[in-house]
Structure formats: structure tokens, C-alpha cells
Image: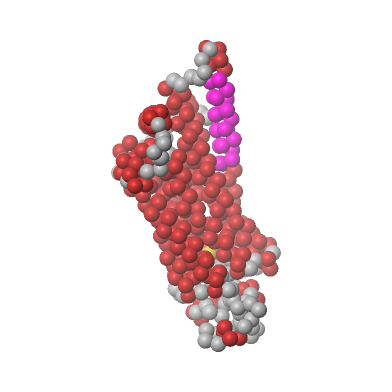
Amino acid sequence: MSYWSNPANMADTSLPSTNPYGNYTVVDTVPKEILHMVDSHWYQFPPMNPLWYGLLGFAIFVLGAMSVIGNGVVIWVFMNTKSLRSPANTLVVNLALSDFLMMLTMFPPMVINCFQGTWVLGAFFCEIYAFAGSLFGCISIWTMVWITLDRYNVIVKGVSAEPLNRKGAMLRILFTWTMALVWCLFPFFGWNRYVPEGNMTACGTDYLTEDTFSHSYLYVYSVWVYFIPLLVIVYSYTFIIKAVAEHEKQMRDQAKKMGVKSLRSDEAQKTSAECRLAKVALVTVSLWFMAWTPYLIINYTGMLDKQKVTPLFSIWGSLFAKANAVYNPIVYAISHPKYRAALQKKLPCLNCSTDGQDSHHDNSTTTSAQAQEKSDNA
């Protein structure tokens, strides 16, 4: 017998049913002032087992704390380390800022609502919550696009490329914030809307309505913030990998002709540092798409076949989408030589290195960091 099918479990916690069909549902704990925002689709589902709310609340608390602390450290280290204040790293700071603000605004309300088992913060805050999640998510993915294009410019075009300057970086950031703000304001003016999601502990865009005009927003918005960035990133990394492979082949051929094991000139060290940072960007972008693809699938499923969308199904898409804000500081702390060196100096307790590392590794890290600084300042 399930929790909700046992009348004894309902004796002290049951509320008058708000469902016009009479049965007790996941909607019945929702405050009456936001019932007008809840789609009738959710009235067919029984209340979720409280265990799910506990697990979701614990997961989002852990992810939120990790993201706020991790991205806060990234911002602090980059802004307080002179050698890291390059135009390219301005984009990294913008990414960390958007991730920081996302989880700072997302996880405390969600923890509160998971503890209560429903959305208790009112209709207006539900809209603001969904708006913030959409805004910072859009900023993150387009900042990823600019970081990827910068790596493409440096690695593929090489010396013929026009280096990114501070004005160019700031214009890209301004465009990203303005574009994201405009797109995320549309639901407030009738093109789609922000509503509670199936588990009633978070809010997002309305993908269950059968209105074609409302659907058009999600189709167009998904093209702008998902499919176009995906195509740009796949295109860029295709040529980045091709350029790296060609460079490595040339290095091996030249070393064979000279009768040496390898060639490690300053140019090679520079390229090596650039390639490592390209791998960092590739991993970060891949994790972002792994996080947001489930949410995209849920939105499209809701528009095309909403009977397959359940409250439990909607939980994990929302959680995975928010989890992307955790990945970036972890990736940079492990893989970014100059950031790791600055982090070790400013916060030795967070040092990622081990006692078994030898001096060769330390020299390699230092050389790579210097090479990347030259690349950034070129």
C-alpha cells in the first residue's frame, strides 16, 4: 500500500480538495492564490511521496551550496589576480557570475518549497523565480558560445586572427545580457507565461498550454538559446580538433626528421596551453548541454504529447538544468593552470595538487600559464 492510499496518513495533513473532479491530487496543497497558474494537466496525478521532496530538497541544497561557494571563489580569484585579467577571462568571470546568480536565486526558494511540499512563496515570486532561471541560463549558454568562438579564433586562425580585446569582450557581455533580458521578459507580456511546474516546488515556462501562440515562444526561444549555440559550438570544435590534430602531426614529423623524441619550443608550449584550455571549454560546454537537454526534452514533450509528462518526470529535468551552475568552477579549478596557481596562492586549503607531484609538473604548469598569458595579451 502506498503512502497516499493509506487513510491514516492523511488524517492530520489532508486539506480540502481544490480539484473540481473531487480526488486528492498533487495540486491540493497549492495555495489558492496561485491556482489560476496551475495547468489542469496536473490534477490527474496523486500527491508525490514526501520522500521525493526530501531527496529533491537535499540535492538542490548541496548543489546550491557548491555552486555559490565555487563560483564565488572563481569570481574572487579572477578579479583579484592581475595576471588573470585578460579580455578572454572577462568572459569566464561573466560565466561564473551568471552561474553564481542562478543558484543564489534558485536554490533557497526551492529548498523552502521542498520542505513545505508545495510552492508557498506566492504567484508574483513564482514568476520572478522562473524569470531568473531562464535569464541566467540564457546568459550562461551564450557566454559559453563566446568562450568557444574565442578558442576557435586563437587556435584555428592562429597568428592571422584578430585577438580579442577588452572592448570586444565587454560588447559581447553587454549583448548577451541585453538579449537574454529581452527574451525572458516576453512571458510577462503574454507571449507564453511563467507557471508552477509539476512537482509544485519550482516554476518555469508554460509548456502544457495548447495555445499555438504560446508554443511559438518556446520553439523560437529554444532555437535561439539551444540549437543555434549547439551548431556554433559543434562547428567550432570540429575545426579546433582538426587544427590540433594537424599541429600534433606536424610536430611528430618534424621531430622524426631531426632525430629527436619531441619538439618543445616556446611556440609549442603556447599551443599546448591553448589546447588545454580548449579542452576545458569543451568539457564545460558538454556538461552544460547534458544539464539542459533533459529540460528541453520535457518542454517539447509537454507541447507535443503532454500525457507523458508527470510530476516526477519534471523534477529531474529542473534539477539537472540547475546543476550546470556547479560544473564550471570544478572544471576550472582542476584544468586551468593559471587559475589553479592563483587559487593555490590565495587559498592553499583548496589546492588541487598532491604531495606526489614533482618539480617537472610544477615547471610545466608555470610555463603553460606564462604561455597562456602571452596568448591572452597578444
Residue situated furthest front in the rendering: 356
Residue in the image at 49% along x and 66% along y: 57
Side of 51 relative to 360 (left or right): right
Residue 47: say if magenta: no
Q: Position of residue 37 (x, y in %)?
A: 54, 73
Res. 190 in view:
no
Residue in the image at 50% along x and 49% along y: 141
Q: Position of residue 223 (x, y in %)?
A: 59, 51
Q: Relative to residue 258, is residue 279 depicted above or below? A: below
Res. 238 in view:
yes
Side of 150 relative to 48 (left or right): left
Q: Position of residue 194 (x, y in %)?
A: 52, 66
Q: Position of residue 272 (x, y in %)?
A: 47, 29
Residue 249: say if magenta: yes
Span colored in magenta: 233-252
Quadrant of the rendered image containing residue 377: top left
* Location of the C terminus (image quadrant): top left
Total numbered circles: 0
Residue in the image at 54% along x and 61% along y: 318
Q: Relative to residue 84, is residue 194 depicted above or below? A: below
Q: Could you tell me what secondary structure mostly forms the magenta stretch?
A: helix
Task: Please name whichever residue, 202 or 175, is drawn nearer the observer in this view of the structure.
Answer: 202
